[in-house]
Amino acid sequence: MTDAASGAVDRSVQVKLVLLGEAAVGKSSLVLRFVNNEFQPNKEPTIGAAFLTQKCRLEDRVLRYEIWDTAGQERFHSLAPMYYRNAQAAVVVYDVTKASSLEKAKSWVKELQRQANPNIVIALAGNKIDLVQSSSSPSTAAPASDSEDEADDATATPGETPGSAGEPESLRQVPREEAQAYATEAGLLFFETSAKTGQGIIEVFTEIAKKIPIEHILASTRGAGRNGAQVSRPGASRQEGNVNLEENQTKGRDGCNC
Amino acid sequence: MEISAVLTLGEQGIEDAYAGKLYLIPPYLSFTSLDRKSVRFTMPLSTVRRVERLNARAGVYALSLITWHSSKIIVQLTSLRPTADAFCVLLRDALKVELQRGQMKVVKGFVKTCYSEHLLSSSSSSSSVTIADSSPATEREDGELVPETKEGQEASEPEYLGGLGLKFKFPGDPRKLREASKIKLWTTYLKTHGRNLTLLRYPQCTRLVQVGLPNRLRGEMWDTLSGSLYLRYNNPGVYDDVVRQIREKTGTLLGKTSTSFEDIEKDLHRSLPEYAGYQSEEGIDALRRVLQAYSYKNPHVGYCQAMNILAAAILIYMSEEQVFWLLEVLCDRLLPGYYSPTMHGTLLDQRVFESLVARHLPDIHDHFQSVDVQLSVASLPWFLSLYINSMPMIFAFRIVDCFFCMGPKVLFQVGLAILKINAEKLLLVQDDGGFLSLMREYFSTLDDSAHPTSPSPRTRAITCFQHLLLISFREFSSITSEVILAERRKLRNEVVNTIESFAKRAAVRNLRTFGRVGKERAGFVYDALYKAMCEEPPPPELANGSPYGLSSKDVDHGEMAGVTTGTLVQVIDGQQEKVETKIGLKTFRVFLGEIATWARDEKVIFNGFQQRIDRQVAEHELIDRLFYFWDTSCRGSLSFQDLVSGLDGVMFNDLMESIEWFFNLHDKDKDGYLTKDEVLTLSESLLFIFRHEIGDTYLGAVSRFMSNAFEYGDALLDAGHGRGAGDDHGFGERRGQEREGYANLGMEEAGMAERKRATEISNNQPYLNLATFRMVVLADEILESFFETDLAASFRLEPVIDLELPTHASGGLLGDLWSNIATSDNKRIFHKLSDELGKTIGKHQVVYRPAIGRYTRAEEPRARESILSPVPSKSTTGSSSGDSYTLAPSTSSSTLTIEPPLPPLPHDDNLAPALTPSAALSSAGLATMPHLQAVSAAFLERTPFAIDDVGDEDGDDEDDSELDEVHGGDEDDDQVMDEVDAFLEANDSGLSEADKQVARDLVNAKPM
Ligand SMILES: Nc1nc2c(ncn2[C@@H]2O[C@H](COP(=O)(O)OP(=O)(O)OP(=O)(O)O)[C@@H](O)[C@H]2O)c(=O)[nH]1
Ligand SMILES: [Mg+2]
């Protein structure tokens, strides 16, 4: 109900984004981190799908992510098309400590590429990276709090595929290189993330925002399209800042005007 | 047996008399009032303590029943006298049986598990209500002394079952929930109307449920109202047994790899995590046990997310065993198919809901259509989690109360009311997101006043939730259980088709490669596969979501183990359901019979009434050989991909490729040579393929092939020792002779003869290479044309249809009969019947349909001049298909020509009418897969609960009085009672004054 809102909101670009991936890989946690910057260790499984919004700014324009967080269990699969129809972006999540979850992710990518909006921007996210990082963290950013997590990881069997030699990543089942190679081949954005520590989350949404053909969306959603890129000016002047997306966590999950 | 009856409660002045039907379904006795909602009971016969025939006015036949709980019920049997007598006899016999089974003693122990017993025994001293006619130590009709009531109630130490709430507290503020008043009202009700096993459900009961069950009694009432109580009563110890079995298996393959168990494990800590009970191991363990037990006992359902939330919620109020049985009723009877792997029940009810919205709230429906908003984005989780996941728990539980009492229609009524209340705002919604946000907003205000600006404090005190229930039951009272059932029936096919086509699309999409088969034909392969799986379900270890990924085959092939486990692990973890289904040999035979003309026996049967084709799956070594040939990864099973790839390898071959394919098929060790044995097997394969062809053209060809193969093979062997090839003297003559010989010998003997002749090298040594084989084949025009087109064309990918020929001209008796036949079993019987009839009138004929049908007449086979100079393929003998076929009938001597011709392809206009009988099975669409429809229809058919039809109760409040809390939330339970009374007054029993008088008299009547 954008009509009711102020002009600035009205002129932001709406991006419909869907999260897909095997059950319990951390889709909901990832969204919660992005939208509320928080982490709940015991998040209820998603039934059907959850809907959240987050507004953020990229350079001089305001984006309003409408996020559909879907249920991961295989039997909810047939419902997925209901949620990914008309999506402009998708984040396909797998769990780096569970090899099978990458297989599931691949099949989601395949489905999206064949059935979803042809211009959809797809990002592949290997989540729970905190579990496989030791204090001497390789290449990637912030060292995570140590991985003494319970429950979920208990089921994970010790890695059948140790990553590149020398890494103390006993829990890791999906080597970064393997997923990266697949993502490149399939034309996806690729990230390793942790909803628990927040690592890599903002990047996912930033890179998606950059890749999305915003002009195109503007033109199609705002019928006339006369305002084009300039329109977002007022919004930009209101909340200054630059490339960073983090600014408006304040409003939380209901940050949208609905 | 059922009988018309008028029910009166023994204690005068409490309830009206109701007319209805009394059912004796041993071991239960049950009553339903005529409107099927006002009054009902179902009690085990073992709870009937005493039955007496009453001495009443002339012409009145009445029984007085005294239950375990000392309620006195009077039933006046209003059917004719002989019926009433018969009923009494049956009742007495059934009671005796129960007594002999020792069930009467079981009751005592069982009722102790119910909280109500505890409640009443502790309140009995202070209660002012007296139980009428409670005579001490009553004697049963059969003379056995039954312990008196008080003894049953004595055991008042808390032996009753209860949920986590007893220890971890119940959600909600007991004061605000007015627990004390509710308990008081229920105590009164249960005292006069029986309880648990003997509960009599009068309108007041429903009314009290609508006001919200008190926490302590909630579990038991869910148990009783849903009927799960009876399952628990009838299956003592089963739950513990299942739990023990699981414990014993934990650590074995099952415990570790069952997909369901894995999924359950993922969700244990994600079920109502905010509730204290689930922050303790105690709660988590109980939840694990219950979910595992259910999925273990119901592998076809397994575990579905959302069940964890339901189970966790219910477990607050009920013991594990009670939850276990309640889940059974919930998943099986109340919400059939909701949590199954396809979730067809969920999808179906979403469609039903949508159609109800279209009918009752057309504005919203139209608006949603115009802005492309999907109802299910919001409503699916409502239904799937019984609103527990959508609104604050204390409110959701009140909906659950009504749900167990009145059935699934409640979910629809509440859903419609939610939309109606928010109609104005919904009409402004522009997209799915807006819709969801609005709903979330609404659910967060349920505790607020519904009329905050009203001047009247009473009105102001009505909460949004009360308002919601009011609208649900008042405005949508027309949504009865019958309406829901009818809608489900109407929309079922549509939903089945959607699911099926979705599964198909997904499976086709997941193929790694189509090869030349292409997407569309892959779809047909899928259809045939699906059909085959319906007819011959793959063994459980191959079926999807299998707990054991390894088939015995894998274990045997030690050297394969590494490879195999690699793939299988993926299958188990990655794609649990549907997608990676594999089939075994048995299913493969059916599958191949679907698509390869030679892999089935088709009998065309005429019996004077109908003409039909009986299709039977053939069995032959060739079919099994093909199975293993296509099983390239040696897993002893074939996936959809294997089948598509396999077909790709044969369906599009030209002459040379076909020959090579057939050669490879028989070259088991793949060394590029056939052994002599393999040459023989190959010949047998050919004979098998040609077994129904007309005439002995092919027989001759195969004989020539054999002799040529051995002749030439030997020649080459010799050539290998220095002699030149190409010595074909006398070939023609010998061929001629041999043809005669073979025609007379059986195939087996022919093989033996060959074997004997060619003993120079041992039978299992490399003998014939591809080049030679090719030459031998090309030497024969008939075989050449077979390999050029017929072999490839014998695989047919077309829409799967039933091979049912129309019952033309017959009409009349059998025609009518036909249209009443639904199942394939019935059809078989029908066919048999008409065959028998046909035989008696001498019109029964059976003709085999040929697999290739190139030769329409017995024809002299012509041999080629030389095997070394194959003529470019120009098949002159074979005419194109579609000509009229002359078939040699096997049972009658006359030759019969079918007009119009039997089409060789099942997909032919001539067959179109054939679909009518089976299409009649399904009211809507999908004429191409009537078979699947029948199967799916049966699949969706819910089994009605014979004992306690929960769906029948209808809570439509004719009176406008609002729920008790409506009146300002004051603690005055008299007021609540007034409301209930007002409600009751408004409900007429539908009996005339005179009838009521009779009923009233009976209360005071003396036993005969
Ligand atoms: N250590 C760690 N645990 C995580 C991370 N993300 C999620 N989890 C945990 O994984 C479990 C599942 O997380 P969810 O976000 O509910 O998973 P989901 O993908 O939404 O699951 P479904 O809704 O069932 O499809 C929870 O117990 C989380 O606490 C992470 O980055 N690191
Ligand atoms: Mg989730």
Image (spheres, coloured by chain):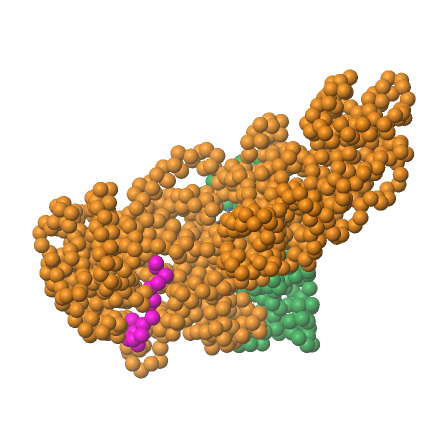
Residue B280 position within the rendered picture, expressed as x and y whole percent measured from the top left = 35, 46
- State left or right for residue B75 relative to residue B443: left
The chain whose colour is green is: A
Task: From the viewer's side, name the closer residue of B89 and B12.
Answer: B89
Task: From the viewer's side, name the closer residue of A119 and A132.
Answer: A119
Is the magenta region chiefly helix, strand or loop? Answer: loop
Task: From the viewer's side, name the closer residue of B938 and B500.
Answer: B938
- State left or right for residue B91 relative to residue B343: left
Q: Quadrant of residue B551?
A: top right
- State left or right for residue A44 relative to residue B47: right
Inspect the magenta stretch and tell me whether residue B956 lies in it: yes
Residue at 82% x, 30% y is B736
Residue extent of the magenta highlight: B949-963
**Colour displayed for chain B in the image of the structure:** orange
- Residue sitting farthest toward the bottom: B455
Inspect the magenta stretch and tell me whether residue B217 lies in it: no
Residue at 63% x, 59% y is B913
